[in-house]
């Protein structure tokens, strides 16, 4: 980031990048850039809670795994079947809604 031009927003597309960017934001190494991302770890929720991340998209990891195995199983049974595109369910969490009733289930499954 120090060698790059100043940016206003940073969007990460995976949990590892989001946590790394959250850590950089906490030490002010993002130089004021607003951070958004996709994540599913307690570290991501921590950085959301502390205000380092502005918005967090949390994919349903269990559902994604289940859909993948079901699609693979179906493809093995029918060799000529073309794989289908499936949308993974997700939750959008902001700091002000982090502890809302709707997000309690997401937080509970993350702590398990």
Image (cartoon, rainbow, N blue to C red):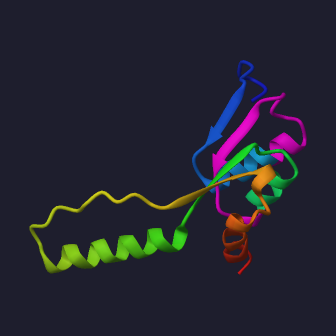
User: Which residue is drawn at the image coordinates 77% and 30% (left, top)?
Assistant: 33
User: Which residue is drawn at the image coordinates 68% and 65% (left, top)?
Assistant: 102
In this view, the residue in front, 76 or 92, is 92
Quarter of the picture containing the N terminus is top right
Does residue 73 appear left or right of residue 78 in this picture?
A: right
Q: Position of residue 60 (x, y in %)?
A: 54, 66
Q: Which residues, given as a range, are shown in magenta?
A: 23-42
User: Which residue is drawn at the image coordinates 76% and 65% (left, top)?
Assistant: 42
User: Which residue is drawn at the image coordinates 36% and 76% (left, top)?
Assistant: 69
Q: Position of residue 29 (x, y in %)?
A: 85, 35
Does residue 50 appear left or right of residue 11 in this picture?
A: right
Magenta highlight on residue 40: yes
Does residue 33 appear left or right of residue 89 in this picture?
A: right
Magenta highlight on residue 24: yes
In this view, the residue in front, 26 or 112, is 112
Q: Position of residue 44 (x, y in %)?
A: 74, 57
Tell me which corner region of the image, top left, top right, bottom left or bottom right, holds residue 58: bottom right
Relative to 85, residue 101 above or below: below
In this view, the residue in front, 50 or 22, is 50
- Residue most extreme to the top: 5
Tell me which corner region of the image, top left, top right, bottom left or bottom right, holds residue 10: top right
- Residue most extreme to the front: 101
Relative to 64, residue 33 above or below: above
In this view, the residue in front, 17 or 70, is 70
Q: How many marks?
A: 0
Tell me which corner region of the image, top left, top right, bottom left or bottom right, holds residue 99: bottom right
Relative to 30, residue 60 above or below: below
- Residue most extreme to the left: 80
Quarter of the picture containing the C terminus is bottom right
């Amino acid at each position: 980031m120090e060698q790059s031009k100043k940016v206003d927003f940073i969007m990460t597309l995976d949990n590892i990048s989001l946590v790394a960017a959250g850590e950089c934001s906490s030490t002010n190494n993002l130089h004021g850039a607003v951070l958004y991302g996709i994540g599913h770890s307690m570290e991501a929720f921590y950085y959301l809670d502390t205000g380092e991340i502005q918005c967090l998209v949390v994919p349903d990891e269990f559902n994604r795994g289940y859909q993948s195995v079901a699609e693979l199983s179906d493809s093995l049974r029918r060799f000529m079947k073309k794989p289908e595109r499936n949308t993974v369910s997700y939750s959008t969490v902001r700091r002000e809604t982090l502890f809302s009733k709707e997000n309690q289930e997401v937080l509970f499954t993350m702590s398990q």
